[in-house]
Amino acid sequence: MMPAAQRPVRLALLGGGRGSFIGAVHQAAAQRDNRFDLVAGVFSRTLEKSREQAFLWGVDPERAYASHEDMFRAEAGREDGIEAVAIATPNDSHFPIARAALDAGLHVICDKPMTATLEQARQLATQVEAAGRAFALTYTYTGYPMIREARARVAAGVLGAVRKVVVEYPQGWLWQPTDESNVQAAWRIDPERAGKGGCIGDIGVHAFQLLEHVSGLRVEELCADLPRLVPGRTLDDDCNVLLRLEGGVPGVLIASQACPGERNGLRLRIYGERASLEWSHAAPGELRILTPDDRVEIVFAGAASLSPTSLAATRLPVGHPEGFVEAFANIYTDFAQAIRTGAPATEVPGADEGLRSLEFIERAIASDAERRWLPFVEKTA
Amino acid sequence: MMPAAQRPVRLALLGGGRGSFIGAVHQAAAQRDNRFDLVAGVFSRTLEKSREQAFLWGVDPERAYASHEDMFRAEAGREDGIEAVAIATPNDSHFPIARAALDAGLHVICDKPMTATLEQARQLATQVEAAGRAFALTYTYTGYPMIREARARVAAGVLGAVRKVVVEYPQGWLWQPTDESNVQAAWRIDPERAGKGGCIGDIGVHAFQLLEHVSGLRVEELCADLPRLVPGRTLDDDCNVLLRLEGGVPGVLIASQACPGERNGLRLRIYGERASLEWSHAAPGELRILTPDDRVEIVFAGAASLSPTSLAATRLPVGHPEGFVEAFANIYTDFAQAIRTGAPATEVPGADEGLRSLEFIERAIASDAERRWLPFVEKTA
Amino acid sequence: MMPAAQRPVRLALLGGGRGSFIGAVHQAAAQRDNRFDLVAGVFSRTLEKSREQAFLWGVDPERAYASHEDMFRAEAGREDGIEAVAIATPNDSHFPIARAALDAGLHVICDKPMTATLEQARQLATQVEAAGRAFALTYTYTGYPMIREARARVAAGVLGAVRKVVVEYPQGWLWQPTDESNVQAAWRIDPERAGKGGCIGDIGVHAFQLLEHVSGLRVEELCADLPRLVPGRTLDDDCNVLLRLEGGVPGVLIASQACPGERNGLRLRIYGERASLEWSHAAPGELRILTPDDRVEIVFAGAASLSPTSLAATRLPVGHPEGFVEAFANIYTDFAQAIRTGAPATEVPGADEGLRSLEFIERAIASDAERRWLPFVEKTA
Amino acid sequence: MMPAAQRPVRLALLGGGRGSFIGAVHQAAAQRDNRFDLVAGVFSRTLEKSREQAFLWGVDPERAYASHEDMFRAEAGREDGIEAVAIATPNDSHFPIARAALDAGLHVICDKPMTATLEQARQLATQVEAAGRAFALTYTYTGYPMIREARARVAAGVLGAVRKVVVEYPQGWLWQPTDESNVQAAWRIDPERAGKGGCIGDIGVHAFQLLEHVSGLRVEELCADLPRLVPGRTLDDDCNVLLRLEGGVPGVLIASQACPGERNGLRLRIYGERASLEWSHAAPGELRILTPDDRVEIVFAGAASLSPTSLAATRLPVGHPEGFVEAFANIYTDFAQAIRTGAPATEVPGADEGLRSLEFIERAIASDAERRWLPFVEKTA
């Protein structure tokens, strides 16, 4: 009687302590469609704080742990132990946690970037391929229904062959020398914790991933300029990259974290032979289609004429806005579906896309350092 | 150790069966901030379907009931019985359920309109006043942070005295003779189930309530025109109302459900002596302030300069869109807070505002029928 | 060899002295398409100032006159005398000047409103019908190419039968007690010079005329509320009107001159059985078409897919904005065409529409005074 | 009595024959403010067609010439001969005409690009410096009042030091293999007539010039990618350029003529230390100022709070749109002012900026060919 495919997945969350932005998003997204039971977690660095958070989220405090090692060990011994793990900790911990989780036979959903280094990414991608477990990366923007609509239309050939791609991701919140008291900011501009890339690694990868994900084309060459807009910064807080994709298709990627007044304005434009597409995070429920006869058609999330893929990612009637958490939730829900059915989640970025992103970071940094165009080296190269 | 103020409220939901729009919104909103445990409900008209829904929402099927009478009786006998009830059933059932819930000592959160008739509204308002229980109406739009910001700025005198108000609520989904297979549409155009008003009762009240809620002024006179745009309709599917508020302030209220292509475009403009405000549901995270020196300032949900009231209703950093469910959730969270603290929820519409809405519906229908201006009679009149 | 149809029309302008807003617009619009030679005028109240302006506009100072009587007499005696006259003087002088011009056998283009009183309008309309001269009213907004596109689409049945009309015209420039030093403002709020209506007569008529012009439907009933938003005003500075048009079609007209921060935001929405149209003066080169499948199509001035009527009113390629003066110039150019060809200017408002506007002002004021719905009495009534 | 400073300048126009886009804009712009008398011209390649156009524009057909040589000779002999010449012919003729005009002692206003080659530009710049005549380039966008406002604010330090610049100029009209019957298109994609650059020379220079003009910073390094989006094109129809300006300030320039559905969407963003600016040609009368506290302020052309420079370039009250021709006219009017007063036109691009543009074209093409960053070589280098 109970449809097994809809039985909630028992989930543990790593991250999400007080002051966390993305951990709380994972928690809200996981529960949005009732496809997960959050039953365990390492929510903070101390057991006490971890338990406090467990209380707030309705998790049995006995299943709040101090480390992932403790958790995996304890949960393995339970009949109702966790089936999947969500990783929302700082970038440098993604790799060891994901490895251990896969070793423990768990499904994994992980924040981006997949790992802190390219070498780790290669190892993890190999492990994922062998593990036979669902593996998802929460590249949030791929979860928006109108991004899915855009991707579906490109794939269906609505634009004809893609001929140019422009992606922008301007932010302003790191516009001034950073106050160490800003937890979110501090680690992102610290090379020890953030990895080699600053802006390129934090949001440049979002732009890169979205561009490849929607266009269906891979970057083959790039020329990157990674300035430091705020005096005294070690890491880049801005990035501007010329691209050439498969077939010689040109592209431009612009991102910044130091443009005063920019909020979170990810924007994607894909130009084809016959028509063009525009999407902007400032109005995430809209997609604009430009036609050469000088018409702009706006289509809205939830409209009956949209693709099944897009409609499946929309819960409310047209005109009732959904937001960031629902985009995130779409990734979670597809992840649950993949766990329960064993079928791959075609709309959800996996280890391959995660690896591409790490390669992108490395190549962009190298191009910037060498002040020249570089080929985008494939993992097999 | 466990902060009692944050202990989740044990909630039952009435409504929310398959195909329900608003029931599912209640469920998602209630759980959004982990302030409620959904532990019981009457989710559908048959026990079997009610239990199926219980399974999907992680509710113990034993606590899925066939009627509110059954539920209130059974839950009263449990130590962990429900503390509050959410009413998301058709309009004509709001009154008997709410009465019974208050009689059972429960806190009540109810969809709009509060009741099907003005007489019921008067009785219920009286009962609420006597009951000493938290009572909230889910006028969704009052939950948006930028509506709260607008209200705070008006109250703080930022605009100077309010001098004109315009509110519009165009929809298009009932643009053609209605297919009986459309569950959402069918009851809304049926006088038996919808009550006397069509458009005026379904969305005109949203516009009316928002206008009084944000402006802080009460309507004193009105002249309504309630057309039937689609041939053959018994109930109005469009409404246009001239208003005079306290102090002679003029207002205009326009709503429709039969304007092809309009999605859910609630829009509010408040003009003051010194400045003006605009808010549109199409971009709910923005508020526009117009100044007489011809500047328009846009402020965004989550910006540090906003009022504490608005910021308390925002979970994510600026530039990360929240939507309809979060607006709804803000009402739920304030309701939980009111239950736990006993303090009134100042931002949440209660029985008084519910009664005003029923009075508005009745007076608008009378004005339309008599083709003339009418005073807005107070309940004491 | 010289195509007679394109021979410029010899024009005199009344008005346009220093500080004039609309006189200078007439001058610029008349010359925009090289269809007129401005050869004479009464540009100011004194001969000296009139001649100064003549110099600035390249008019022979000998043909700058002190009064329209002087001008008509002197020009009648010249072989190269004026053929047409443009009236851009205050409202109360339109009638005597237009009568005299028609008596002198001249073609007339006149600013709105056509006359200061309804009685004058009736007389002038009769005279125009008898005179056999081209007569045009510069209802500017009818000259915008996208308004012409909207009108063409409504007439072609693209929307199906019109079912609702909403027109708004918010301004803010009279938001505070008026400084007498503001020439533009002073006469508009002075009952002696402005006529009986304030806002209703100055911009309410624009909204009314546009609504009838584009919808093709005539107002049959109205209920007007004409407040004074600024304390101490004698004339209305705000107007809100419920309408019923032919066939019972409902309409709403909202206008104001005292809404702080509103600039000149004329906006028109026409809802039909099958689709809807939106136009806003804030983006005059765009027209939005809304369809019931929740798509919004934006079409742009100059796009090849537009109607011939619209394209004929556009000079520049798509994406190159034209503005207020070009809209005005389109009326002038059609007026020249009517003079040279003798064929009526179908897109240009004439005496009939001028008369309708005066009737509207009178009926709106009466409805406001009586606080009730009134029939819109036809001139034959 | 006649104020000499306002005496109209006797102007000849080269270009403007039937089918011309920009020639007609020059004619309309020159006459917009009554600062020029168009008295002569070479409007077409044959004397007959030149005379036909003269008739349409009210020019004495005797002063319509077949060549600039004929015109300069004949006009030099007249007491009322031309004082200035406007050059709106194809790019390759700018240089010989401008040289001859300066040799004839005439003031020159010339369309962009100033010349067809960098070598010509150097020679002409030298001649202009020696000639002591007014020399203006019609970089249209510099004439928009809100571009002037942007420039004034940057210069006044409102943003703090500029830290990043992004300029985009997407068009779509050359989106498909070009029909030879399209006069406008044909010469632009023909290397013989257009010069070495395609998109970079036609609109890339607009973007480049605007960026330097408003930011006040000069480009010092660039890395250009100039693709051919439409198969078979010899010249670039797309360009993407990374820039470094003085002080290491990064910039990005994107332009295209082959992006289906893009109209004429020039857009400029300037980010400073403390605030940012945005301007878009789609709404040319608006300027957006972004502040780090997450407010966006929109200011509108004609608003009293704007700079004198901007207000001087606006004729109509706020809310009354002006467009492309008025932007062009502002350049013409400043040019007239410079002629009559002898003072330089500070807002108008001259030979120095013209030379910069030619240098930019050459360096961008070289960088594209060499696939690498290049310094922007100064003329003195």
Image (tube, coloured by chain):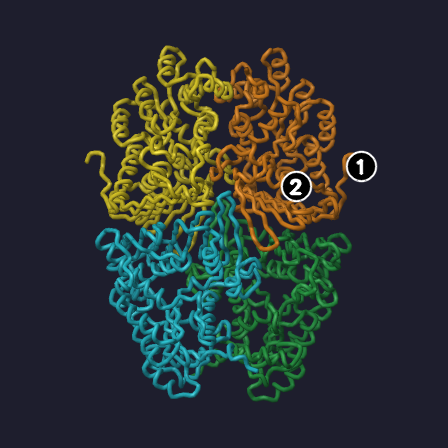
Chain colours: A green, B cyan, C yellow, D orange
Expressed as whole percent of the image width and height from the top left, the position of residue A97 reads 67, 76
- Disc 2 secondary structure class: loop
Query: How many residues crowd mark 2 within 10 Å: few (<14), some (14–19), many (20+)?
Result: few
Q: Which residue is mark 2?
A: D156
In the image shown, does A202 or D15 lie closer to the viewer? Answer: A202
Give the mark nearer the N terminus: 2 vs 1: 2
Q: Is residue A175 above or below residue A88?
A: above
Query: How many residues crowd mark 1 within 10 Å: few (<14), some (14–19), many (20+)?
Result: few
Mark 2 belongs to which amino acid?
A: Ala
Instruction: Say whether residue D74 is visible.
Output: yes
Q: Which mark is residue D381?
A: 1
Q: Furthest residue to the front?
A: C232
Q: Is residue A91 above or below residue C262?
A: below
Instruction: Say whether residue A356 is visible.
Output: no
Question: Mark 1, chain letter?
Answer: D
Residue at 47%, 75% in the rendered image: B341
**With D223 as the anchor, is A322 left or right in this view?**
left
**Quarter of the view holding residue B56:** bottom left
Expressed as whole percent of the image width and height from the top left, the position of residue C86 reads 39, 24
Instruction: Please count the marks in the image.
Output: 2
**Quarter of the view holding residue B21:** bottom left
Question: Mark 2, chain letter?
Answer: D
Q: Is residue C284 above or below residue B205?
A: above
Quarter the C terminus of chain D occupies: top right
In the image shown, does C226 or C351 lie closer to the viewer? Answer: C226
Quarter the N terminus of chain D occupies: top right
In the image shown, does D329 or D103 lie closer to the viewer? Answer: D329
Expressed as whole percent of the image width and height from the top left, the position of residue D328 reads 56, 32
**Cα–Cα span, label 2 and label 1:** 31 Å
Mark 1 belongs to which amino acid?
A: Ala
Expressed as whole percent of the image width and height from the top left, the position of residue B276 reads 46, 49
